[in-house]
């Protein structure tokens, strides 16, 4: 199944235990691998590179944790 990055924006993120985590605000792409690396909750300030690094650790979900994308994004863990 193929999904476009724009289809991820605004989707609700649910944990494997059924808890609401948040909504996709930003999608981080690893340009070297040509793949999505993280989903961020909320928007980041592109003018400050330090904000992006903090957001990855504080509000980021590694895309490898994504188990299913449908009406919501289901991720492993809690």
Image (tube, rainbow, N blue to C red):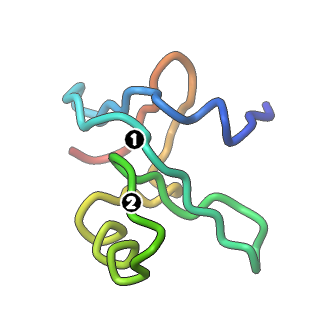
In the drawing, what numbered circle is on residue 44? 2
- Lateral position of residue 75 relative to residue 8, left or right: left
Name which residue lies at 64% across and 30% down.
7
x%, y% of residue 64?
52, 57
Name which residue lies at 57% across and 35% down.
8
**Outermost residue to the top:** 71
x%, y% of residue 74?
42, 32
Above/below status of 32 relative to 55: below
Name which residue lies at 79% across and 31% down.
1
Quadrant including the C terminus: top left
Name which residue lies at 46% across and 31% down.
73
* Badge 2 element: loop
In the drawing, what numbered circle is on residue 47? none
Above/below status of 6 relative to 65: above
x%, y% of residue 37?
57, 64
Quarter residue 24 falls in: top left
Above/below status of 50 relative to 41: below
- Lateral position of residue 43 relative to residue 63, left or right: left
Q: Which of marks 1 and 2 is nearer the N terminus?
A: 2
- Lateral position of residue 16 relative to residue 47, left or right: left
Label 1, on which residue? Answer: 75
Local crowd size for mark 2, using a 10 Å CA cut-off: few (<14), some (14–19), many (≥20): some
Q: Closer to us: mark 1 or mark 2? A: 2
* Badge 1 element: strand
């Amino acid at each position: 199944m193929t999904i476009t990055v724009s289809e991820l924006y605004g989707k609700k993120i649910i944990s494997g235990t059924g808890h609401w985590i948040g909504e996709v605000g930003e999608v981080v792409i690893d340009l070297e691998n040509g793949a999505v690396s993280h989903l961020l909750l909320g928007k980041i300030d592109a003018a400050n590179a330090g904000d992006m690094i903090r957001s990855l650790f504080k509000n980021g979900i590694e895309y490898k944790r994504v188990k299913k994308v449908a009406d919501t994004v289901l991720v492993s863990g809690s």
